[in-house]
Image (cartoon, rainbow, N blue to C red):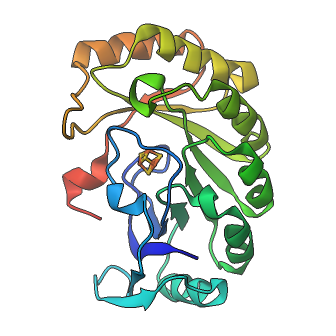
Amino acid sequence: MEIVEVFSSIQGEGRYVGCRQVFVRLAGCNLACDYCDTPGSRGGAAAGRVEAAPGRRDFFTVANPVPAGALAGYVNSLLREPHHSVSLTGGEPLCQAAELADLVPRLAGRRYLETNGTMPDELAVVLPHIDIVSMDVKLPSTAGREWWDEHERFLRLASTREVYVKMVLTGATGDEEFRRALSLVAAVDRRIPVVLQPVTPVGSVTGIAPEDVLRLLAAALDVVDDVRVIPQTHKMMGQL
Ligand code: SF4
């Protein structure tokens, strides 16, 4: 697989914020969100880095592509200390769906997929081996185009497992696109948890005003049952 890095840290986003995870950051992405905080993961790289001891930041370099068996060995070695799960993240991990389906059955821990939610056909390949899906719903104001059809197919599939939806809110988030995203979730199952994530401002991307967060939160709770507002906490903690 084409990897960027493998390391142990603390989940900083979403429903499992605060849980210790082994992160497998895979290379490649099919999107170019304007708030992307892992732009280095979007392309390929000749080599990735792997932490030797969990949490020590004692990385060694491995050449890409890394065979699934070797990658599982690196991950399972970090799992010698207790972790909640293994986060398969990126980039967009489903860009390597066939290879991912080969990797995940070899992992010793629970499998947590962090995905932009735009590749339902690829999700179908991997989903039998996944325990928890963290699915982004990308709003057109930041993703550059609409992904409603792909998102709905994706969420229907993912809802056969444990799933929650994450939505990044910026200063450009519009009421109409927000309402449409919430309607999409409710059409699948209004009990699916939704996490609203105020953006960490980057480049030209501005943060959302606190009063707008409260207004959107109220609108969301009219449509779905479980909504929380959680910013990126790993950045506050200085974690990877
Ligand atoms: S989907 Fe994720 S990795 Fe890809 S561009 Fe958007 S924020 Fe970055």
In the image, residue 154 above or below residue 225: below
Q: Taking the image as drawn, is residue 189 in sight? A: yes
Q: Nearer the viewer, residue 148 or 233?
A: 148
Q: Residue at x 37, y 89 (%)?
A: 61
Q: Nearer the viewer, residue 104 or 80?
A: 104
User: Residue 86's spot in the image, x, y percent?
Assistant: 55, 68
In the image, residue 106 above or below residue 127: below
Q: Nearer the viewer, residue 133 or 41?
A: 41
Image quarter in which the C terminus is found = bottom left
In the image, residue 16 above or below residue 181: below
Q: Taking the image as drawn, is residue 52 in sight? A: no
Q: Answer with left or right where residue 35 lies relative to residue 73.
A: left
Q: Answer with left or right where residue 129 lies relative to residue 72.
A: right
When asked about the image quadrant of residue 197, the answer is top left
Image quarter in which the N terminus is found = bottom right
Q: Residue at x 72, y 44 (%)?
A: 120
User: Residue 105's spot in the image, x, y percent?
Assistant: 74, 75
Q: Answer with left or right where residue 225 lies relative to residue 43.
A: right
Q: Residue at x 57, y 14 (%)?
A: 180
User: Residue 149's spot in the image, x, y percent?
Assistant: 69, 27
